[in-house]
Image: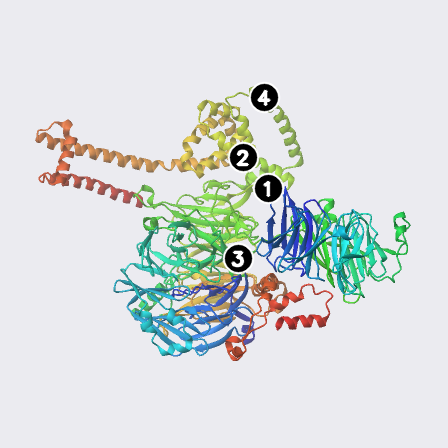
Amino acid sequence: MSPPLLFAKFDPSLTNLALVIQALDSHQVRVQALVVAQDSLNTLFQLKKGQKVAAIEWFSDLLLALALTSGVVLIYSPAENQIVRELQLTTSMAIADLHFSSVTHTAWCVDTNGTLCEWDVHSYTLIQQFSLSELLDTTESVTKLSTVLHNSEPALLVGTHSVYLVDVVGRQVVAQFPGHVQPVIAIEPAKYDADLFLTAAEGDRFINVYSISKNATRSVLVASSSIRQMTLAGSADLSVVAIVTETGSLEIFKDPLSFDVQPLEVSSKKKRKQLAGAKSKHCDATIQYARPADEIRNPADQSLFICAVTATHTHLHVTWLENDSLCRFDAVAWTDGDSFTLLGHKTITKAKQNIMAATHTVQGHDVAAPRLYSEQHTVITDGGMFQDELENLGDDDDETLAERLEKITGESTRKNGVSKKRLQKHTAGSLTVVLSQALRNNDNALLETVLINRDPTIVQSTISRLDSSLAVILIDRLAEKLTRQQQRFDQMNFWLKWIIIIHGGVLSSLPNVSHKLANLHSVLNKKASKLPRLLELQGRMSMLEQQNSLKKEILRGVDLQGEDSAEDDVEYIEEIDDAVEAGVLEEEEDEDDDDDEIDENGVDDFDMSDVEEDEE
Amino acid sequence: MAEISKRWATSMITGGNPLVFTGPCSFPAVSSVDGKYSIVLLSRQIRVYLLQTRQCIRTVDMDMLKVVAVCLDPGNSSQLACFTKKDMFYVSWQENLAEPVVATLAIEPTIEGFVDVFKSASDCYYVLAENDSVLSVLSVDRETAKSCVLFQIEGAHEYAVSRNGHKLAVVLESLQALLYDLTAAVSAPSAKHTQLGFQDAIERTVESFAFPHKSVSCMAVSSTGIIAIGTLLGHINVLYGGSSTGTPKGFLRWHIEPVKSVEFSVDENYLVSGGTEKVLVFWHLVLDRAQFLPRLSGPIDRIFADSNRPDHYSVALRISEGALKIGAHELLVISGLDLVSRLSYAPVCPTFNSSMSKALNAARKRHQKIGGNVKSISHNITAKLTMHPTTKHMYTAQGSSVQAYDLIRGEQAFVQHIAPQVSTGKVRSEKKLVDPEVKEISFTTDGAWMATFDSMPSLNFDNLMSKNDTSYALKFWFWNESSWELTLKVVDPHGPGLEIGCILSNSAESFTTIDKNGGIRIWRPRLNNPLRAVKSLVASQKHSTQTVWTLRRASQTSTITSPVSACYAPDGSFLVVSHDNIAKIYDSAQLLPIDFAIPPVDLPIESLAITGSCLVITSQLKILSYDLVSAREAPLFLHVFARGMGNLVAVDTNKQLIAVAYNEWDTEAESSVYSTISVFSPNSLVPIYSTTSHKAIASLATTQAGFLFMNVDSEVGILSLEDKKKIAGIQQEDDISAQMNKMLINAQAAANVLFAKTVNRKVQSEQVEDSTKFTSQKSVDPALLLSIFNNVDGVGLDSLFEKVVRVSQ
């Protein structure tokens, strides 16, 4: 099996697939519905550290049994996603195989020592237990179990390197079927014909079809490479064997149990001599799953690794792993009811599934919520910025090849010159390199880091080493930043000043300079248009000041009359105020009121003027 | 004449606003029993949404305006029981039937002041009614629709019933809050309801608390008897009924404005409250802890927890914060686990210039004063619609955001904020904060660019010098796959203080803006970074760098501020601009005036359009068409009087048709309006087609399929040619109704496949004796059958038939 996947088994009703996955240092059991949309079951159960799965078996549609190497059988319920029962083997040996018999409706379990147990799957009680070594004199350990009806009595097929038919009632070995040199990994009794069963062995390309009554191999199916999994289905008339090889491809044999078909090829290999008399045949059809041509990124996409296959009386159900984690399923009809439909090689293309999870958020933002306003990456300009089309036509669009060539060569020479110069001039006190980088690449963040500097010497040296052609762009950027945040003028001021001082000469010699500087002009214009308002404010302030001084003068006059020193005026009035508030003094109230009135009148007057001015 | 008129047809596209139920228990979004579907009830449509995909899978068109309460039929969950004040009817929501109303029963005797259905049992419905502050609990038999009073209480001010229908909490005008246990009544079979005697039994269970009724704004009661009362002052009082010990009272304080709605979660561990703050507050009743879900898109009017979907909350959010009596609601279903929306339904939400009720009042007054034949509505009740040229979304401005409405799906596509706004609800003095307002929306002809214009008045807090300044911004947006991306913002695009009155575009690469002083400016795109521009030209990559729009042409402005409008000639060679009542023609390349005099009209021109060689001029007083080639007036001349007439005229330049809507106040029936939409050809005074309705039309727009109209209830319909194949086979794919159908079928199919199996498992047991009842009619769900057709390859017809029979049995 492919590295992460240890076991894969379809449940009897073909609604779920159980997977055992190696997850770091532990085993995971996953049960996944064949049709995700129909059945939302998709569970993941993490086994404890050290619990290694040796075999899995579905006891029913709802219960999965996990046989562990510690000699424990865990009964796992996918619906509840928990272990509902633990069965402990008395021998505490590692379990070699677990088998749920549809013949006896009990679970059979064998450990590596060859001890066989039969469990009742409803009450989870041990029905019987016996050791194979009592019956059999062999050192080979049991690797696979299966049950058949033999003479209308349930009998056990025990696979080691050979297969033994064990009468479970009489506890004796009835027959022995040698044939494999490797441990048997699959035994498939034919459901419609109790006489026949198929076996496959580890690392072996051959499937043996045995007849119990004849105690011999009836035929041999030959796969193209070692067999990993085998499934058998069909009726006496029409049957199919589908196998998955260790390369992950699917091979299908038509009518493996009807022996009147002429063998396609008689092998002359030595190994097969022992099978003399048995007919061998190669597969009739192969199915390959691949990505569509435009989606093939690596060789694995050309042939998807099939994890498991199972056959029903009409269909083959196939599964493979998507992204090494999620199973995808496909069903292929192998018969149309009375004839075999698969022949030859067939490639089925399956596009990578786009998992359409219902997204309720887009980048963390609720889809139902309004889309928020953001001007982070927005250019902000002013209505006064006027750019004529002529300029645009001049430099961008109608560039001849000659001009471009000239530009390229000119640029390269200039670049060389500049770089040399820069190397020579490079000092610690300048940010020219960073600044030109930011301007050339339209890198806003970088530009910010440069503009954050306010040290006049750094600004001066940076600007003085800046290429004049970049100065225009810098001016544009500065103007944009100013439009965005008016209050940053203080910071930008330094930079603007030095650009104009140092590059002013070059700027004024540029053609179309008025268009190039339109942005800056409009910003500065806007700034300048604040002047009338500032003057207005200044006027108001001075008026207030004068009113205040007038008030003081008047008060002083009053106080002089009341024989008080001019300097104590303010304090004294406050005290009076307090007193008035406390209700101690009453006579002074009138005066205070008068003061207030004056004050109010003053304010009123200028409110009026304010309104008038605004109206104007 | 008759032959032609047959070819036009009027059909409604949208379902209208979600219903607003006054009762405490009904909500216009009902969850199906399995919680997978949401049934949204609109004023003229029932929409069924599959929650998982947020898709509408079925619509049932029917007039629902009179429905006051709704619940799932307890006997057959594929039917919806709807109650009007007089009768009840069953609607099948799960399948498309020729006649969606399965049965109608008149309630006998009629219930005065029907408010709500609070519980549905297998044999009867339990109903609340309020008449002259007498609150009654009644039962209505499911089969016979016989109503029967179970319990009455006088002087009820506010009331609530628990979700299971066993507790009734009432705040009386006599400063009392009472808690009743209705178990005796609601657990008795309906046959015994006539025997009465419940009044005493229920009154014996009363628990009384002193409580002032004046400040109560909303309340809820849990099935364990906890009463939550939201107040106008913002705090929530919790009265623990049924507890003999412990604290009988509690306060939950967070809201600063009136609490609009309180609701217990289904497990009753939480109390959920909401109000104008646009914040959903989850109060844990035991741990005394609160959680908040802020920044919902509108003030919360109703919160509803559906027992069929325990971990979700349905919320009704108010869209229009204006003075409309019953505001339109947006419905939102929020998952309680991640507080992310699972479903939202928002109706079309345009900005009407003034409300219908105001306009009607004014019209009535005028009628009383002048008398006689004055029927016109002088108020501007119109709203502006803009159609996107390629996506066919309808754009409407609402405050500082723009709603794009997908007419094909019949639901909102998205809402985009056009300007920064306060996303939290405004309370108290915050209401003085003004949000910017979007005034104009326009698209380039390829639909890739949108230009919007918004104005933002300065905050008037401290009598600042800038208090009368309004800042204007013209914004250029680029359609980036699925959303608009702001690329350029131009502050004061026509200079300080000048407001844009009209934006139009006649190509993919130009916008023309006209300010209210008559200045015209043309904007064209260019690449932002000149250094990059050269590179990208070489690489011929169009959108690799940022594109900005720059001003290329500007004309002189006058000093008079007045309404403007403009239109381009079909070939783009000239531009007609109207300022006040004068229209002038300009050369579109250089913006130089062309010496061609168009006679002035007497009132400001509201809209201009050119079809063929005819210039259609709409003023507040008349609509006239002027032939530019022969320089004289064309035959079409209509005398109207309505403000906002510009929105009520739509011109189809391709088909050379003009649609005009006109609203009249119906003097016969008070407070009702009579509206006419007529389609004219510019060369004839006789309308080609005319349709009337009793809802005032607020806007007309031109689409390729026909003329789109919207009425004042923001329902959208279309006037289109009936048989499109005969007229123009090419335009078939633009047919909105065909696309709608296609979409519905697809969504339905997806839903069916998704749930075929799960539905299959629910084999409902049917009682034999019920088979005579109409409510027991069960239909075979096509979804049941669909699963059979999975993997059908190679299955014989016989076995297929067998399978079908097995499923349908």
Q: Are marks 3 and 4 in contact (CB under 8 Å)?
A: no
Label 2 sits on residue: A443
Say what amino acid the circle numbered 2 marks: Asp
Real-space Cα separation, disc 4 to disc 1, in angstroms? 32 Å
Q: Which mark is residue B393?
A: 3
Q: Quadrant of the N terminus of chain B?
A: bottom right
Real-space Cα separation, disc 1 to disc 3, in angstroms? 27 Å
Q: In the image, is A17 to the left or to the right of A246?
A: left
Say what amino acid the circle numbered 1 marks: Ser
Residue B92 in sight from this viewpoint: yes
Give the crowd class for mark 3: few <14, some 14-19, many >=20 residues within 10 Å.
many
| Chain letter belonging to callout 1 | B
Secondary structure beneath label 4:
helix
Label 1 sits on residue: B544
Query: Which residue shows up at 84% across the image and 55% down it?
Result: A220
Say what amino acid the circle numbered 3 marks: His
Query: Which residue shows up at 50% across the image and 25% down it?
Result: A462
Secondary structure beneath label 2:
loop
